[in-house]
Amino acid sequence: MNCWTSDRKSADKELLTALKIDPGFLPAVTMLADHYLDDKAHGRAAKILETAFKIHPHDSIATRLKAAWKSNDGQFIAKLTKLLAQIESTQQKTAHYLVAKQARDAGLDGEAERLFSAARDLDGGDEDANSLWHCTSCKSRHDDWQAFCPACDEFATLVWQRPAGTSPLIKHDS
């Protein structure tokens, strides 16, 4: 065993000890995840990154999660969105904005807008119940975002829209 391998194992052991004390400690999370990713231990990296993201959502954790999950943009955003339900309540708004930014950076503008809207709604506003996902290709409507339109099977064509004739400033009671 060479000196570097021994030092790396010692470092990993110390990083794991730090994460037992605080699983959201960003420097330890990112360094250990980088070691795991270098070693092609994607599952181990994903486990510590997901745990940390739930406690302390951060852009550097999200970036590493994409590598650990070995997923495309749509899968990555879908998985991050599923993690939102498990985020600590004090971090919900931050997490929504972070995932929305990741979606926008991936070119998934409709999902980004929905997440930005959800983050704004965390301040106490009601989500617009009339908003739906509209396919820009076939014009079909859907209740949930998906990477591929269920009607025409086009990729990344669902955008978040209010129905025509409604105002975002005035809520109509039916």
Image (spheres, grey):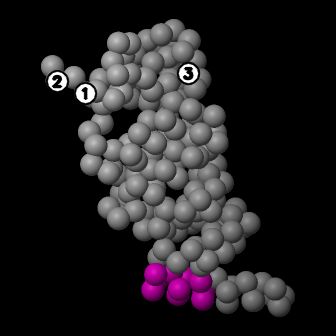
The quarter of the picture where residue 59 lies is bottom right
Amino acid type of disc 1? Answer: Lys
Q: Mark 2 vs mark 3: give the one in front.
A: 2
Residue 92 in the image: above or below residue 112: below
Q: Residue furthest left?
A: 174
Q: Are marks 1 and 2 in contact (CB under 8 Å)?
A: yes
- Label 1: few (<14), some (14–19) or many (≥20) C-alpha neighbours in 10 Å: few
Region in magenta: 13-22
Query: What residue appears at the point 49 percent right and 62 percent down from the top-left corner?
Result: 57
Q: Is residue 14 magenta?
A: yes
Residue 36 percent across, percent down from the top left: 66, 68
Looking at the image, tell me whether mark 2 or mark 3 is earlier in sequence order.
3
Callout 2: SS:
loop
Residue drawn at x 64%, y 82% as measured from the top left? 12
Residue beneath label 2, please?
A: 173
* Residue on which the image places disc 3: 157
One can see residue 76 in this view: no
Residue 137 lies, with reference to residue 161, above or below; the image says above
Residue 20 vs 172, above or below: the answer is below
Q: CA distance from mark 2 to mark 3?
A: 30 Å
* Nearer-the-camera pick, 92 or 40: 92
Mark 3 and mark 1: span between their CA atoms? Answer: 27 Å
Kindly identify the amino acid type of the residue bearing the numbered disc 3.
Answer: Thr
State the residue position of label 1. Answer: 171
The amino acid marked with disc number 2 is Asp
The extreme top residue here reads: 138
